[in-house]
Image (cartoon, rainbow, N blue to C red):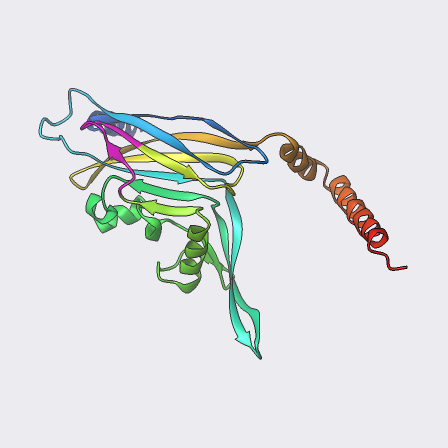
């Protein structure tokens, strides 16, 4: 038992020693507020690659892949078909706990950063991101060209909620970098996880993480909080308002 513990400790120490670089990162704003007139904005992620004494002298070029993931939720993609002149839903696929917002940024094409095996393991690129589906009572991810998966990504991309840009990360110096994180007008509320992965000559060197939060303020926050914490009262208030609106409309547009 003692030998096993010493061996495990040695592996950990050697692993830390082999990590000759570390990433220092931050975002321009860790708390984004959404008001009634919010139309979207862009955060800036900036950072540097810090070397130490064990960094190989010939290691001068780096690659970065930044992954931004919003709050997770269950979502459904439906297939419509024209039947007797009417478009109806004929099939659907449920995606389980997938990111409501997903963005991947790099400093050059993802296929040039590392090998396909490492790219799949590190989920580099939209085609390699794990999007778990419920398939015939089972849970799995499927091939990138699956019709439902492709439609799901396409629809989220059209809304600006899924994106990838292989030229979004800019190295200002050999070790100093920056990238923008665009947030659309309908950006989901919640905590966003940012993962930065470092590569050199195709090898994965390590990663670091940071986060930011998007919150509603003002009347929208009051309504959202009321709906979440007092669902029955919120539903009753909405029903009463609908009835009053209909009653007032009947008076205004009454024909004598």
Residue 74 position within the rendered picture, expressed as x and y whole percent measured from the top left: 53, 50
Residue 125 position within the rendered picture, expressed as x and y whole percent measured from the top left: 31, 48
Identify the residue at the far top of this view.
53
Question: Would residue 248 be found to the left or right of residue 134 on screen?
Answer: right
- Identify the residue at image location x=29%, y=30%: 178
Question: Would residue 9 be found to the left or right of residue 129 on screen?
Answer: left
- Identify the residue at image location x=12%, y=27%: 56
Identify the residue at the far right of this view.
256
Q: Nearer the viewer, residue 18 or 171?
A: 171
Residue 108 position within the rendered picture, expressed as x and y whole percent measured from the top left: 22, 43
- Position of the N terminus, as image quadrant, is top left
Identify the residue at the far bottom of this view.
84
- Identify the residue at image location x=15%, y=23%: 54
- Identify the residue at image location x=15%, y=33%: 61
- Position of the C terminus, as image quadrant, is bottom right
Using the image, determine if residue 148 lies above or below residue 33. below
Residue 189 in sight from this viewpoint: yes
Instruction: Give the magenta-colored segment's residue range.
Output: 167-178
Q: Is residue 200 magenta?
A: no
Using the image, determine if residue 33 lies above or below residue 133. above
Question: Would residue 163 be found to the left or right of residue 31 on screen?
Answer: left
């Amino acid at each position: 038992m003692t030998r096993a513990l010493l061996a495990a400790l040695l592996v950990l120490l050697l692993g830390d020693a082999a990590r000759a670089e570390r990433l220092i990162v931050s975002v321009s704003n860790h708390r984004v507020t959404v008001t009634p007139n919010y139309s979207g904005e862009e955060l800036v992620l900036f950072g540097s690659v810090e070397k130490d004494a064990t960094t190989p002298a010939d290691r001068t070029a780096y690659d970065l892949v930044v992954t931004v993931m919003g709050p997770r939720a269950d979502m459904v993609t439906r297939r419509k078909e024209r039947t007797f002149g009417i478009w109806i839903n004929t099939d659907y696929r449920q995606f389980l706990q997938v990111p409501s917002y997903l963005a991947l940024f790099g400093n050059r094409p993802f296929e040039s950063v590392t090998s396909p095996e490492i790219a799949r393991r590190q989920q580099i690129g939209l085609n390699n991101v794990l999007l778990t589906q419920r398939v015939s009572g089972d849970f799995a991810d499927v091939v990138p060209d699956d019709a439902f998966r492709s439609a799901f990504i396409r629809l989220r991309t059209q809304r600006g909620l899924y994106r990838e840009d292989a030229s979004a990360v800019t190295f200002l110096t050999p070790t100093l970098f920056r990238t923008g994180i665009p947030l659309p007008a309908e950006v989901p509320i919640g905590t966003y996880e940012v993962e930065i992965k470092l590569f050199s000559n195709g090898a994965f060197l390590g990663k670091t993480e940071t986060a930011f939060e998007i919150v509603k303020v003002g009347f929208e926050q009051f309504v959202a909080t009321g709906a979440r914490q007092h669902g029955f009262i919120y539903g009753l208030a909405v029903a009463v308002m609908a009835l009053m609106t209909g009653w007032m409309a009947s008076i205004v547009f009454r024909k004598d």
